Amino acid sequence: MKRALFFDSALLPSGWTQDVRLEIEDGIIRSVSSNASREGAGHHPGIAVPGMPNMHCHAFQRAMAGLAERRGPANDSFWTWRELMYRFLAQLTPDDIEVIAAFAYMEMLEAGYTTVTEFHYLHHDPKGRPYDDVGELVGRIAAAAKSTGIGLTLLPSLYVTGGFGGASPTAGQKRFLNNPDRFLDLVARSRAIVAELPEARIGIAPHSLRAVPPEMLRIVVAACPQMPIHIHAAEQVKEVEDSVAVLGARPVEWLLNNADVGPHWCIIHATHMVPKETGALARSGAVAGLCPLTEASLGDGIFDGARYIAASGRVGVGTDSNIQIDAAAELRQLEYGQRLSLRERNVFASREAESVGRHLFEAALAGGAQACARPVGSIDVGRRADLVLLDRDHPDLAVGTDDHWLDAWIFVTGRTAVREVLIGGERVVADGRHRDHDLLTRRYVAAVTRLLAA
């Protein structure tokens, strides 16, 4: 289907431009014209920017938001949070997973994300038994993406052991577990399931070096050449210490030396690296998948962003545990973490008078598009027409132009500035609300009410 769209202002690869006309066919941008005629085109008022890829998400964790904010009997940490997460997911039915994912994806669209990269490790029933269809829960994630309209990169996750050195899995991990053969069957089934979604992609997600022994990592990576590969690494100090004790190297160091890490890899978190690792990861061309709000929530630590960006490292942002779904808030937290760590301001600006918001936004667009392997991340020929319209009449955007709009969105207004969202040129969010906001919200509230009463 062909259509023409017209925007008063838009951020193109060449910079800010006025009176922009896009010719769209089957959701793909076929031509871009500046200072163009509006005649015959659908007019979308506002400030048009590329939609942000969310390059790391565990959708089911959206329903846990707010449940882990009571102090436990000992020092709380990522590891105590993880035990609560295991107890929570033990209750989830396939219907629950679809309803929660749809609600989370709706919120992403309303907050400026247009693609989600789902790191999907919930595979089996609550007793750890495989479903008759190995892709039962993959199908629920795909259905949630289809119903909301969000673009999808699906990463089935391999989880084999409970810790480094082949430690036995715990009871809480039984819904995750597969051997490499069944995992590769799941990857094949996942490809078939998402085939009907526009420009959907499949990759793999070996969960972590603590959950996937080296020999099994090599098997699945060799079986999936050039597919996106995402892996958690160096999120926690204990994880780094255990990796050194068992593998003789820090997690990122081991991956760089043993796994041929390159541009189709995404290293999630990478929080605890020494400078040598930071520089080597930047040179590899891989993306560092940062989730600043979740990393702050879990007390993970602060990524060495200043050093990494100075080495031309690539970054993307993700919502991870979905405690707050807001593209601008993730970017803001990324910059603010650096400010707190270094006691400086405007860390992600590389030269005098440069807009921090513009630099952050474009870096995350490029890294996110690379990590999700979809044709997104810029308003350009051959890319999907997945666009966010910021509200030009918002009090904090009405008084500026160009890069000021991005600075105000990221550091002041957040998701309240998102007026409209287009997916493949089709409007899915209008006046800040998803087309099915009320229905998806009612279903989510009903599911969570039942889960919390159990």
Image (tube, rainbow, N blue to C red):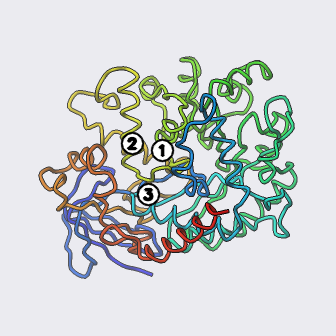
**Distance from Cα at disc 3 to Cα at disc 2:** 12 Å
Residue at the disc numbered 1: 317
**Distance from Cα at disc 1 to Cα at disc 2:** 7 Å
Q: Position of residue 353 (x, y in %)?
A: 20, 31
Q: Earlier in the sequence, mark 3 or mark 2?
A: 3
Q: Earlier in the sequence, mark 3 or mark 1?
A: 3
Helix, strand or loop under label 3: strand
State the residue at coordinates (26%, 58%). 10
Residue at the disc numbered 3: 113
Question: Contact, CB < 8 Å: mark 1 with mark 2?
Answer: yes
Q: Crowdedness of circle 3 by 10 Å Cα count: few (<14), some, many (20+)?
A: many
In which image quadrant can residue 449 be found?
bottom right
Closer to the camera, 157 or 30?
157
State the residue at coordinates (50%, 71%). 149
**Distance from Cα at disc 3 to Cα at disc 1:** 10 Å
Helix, strand or loop under label 1: strand
Residue at the disc numbered 2: 331
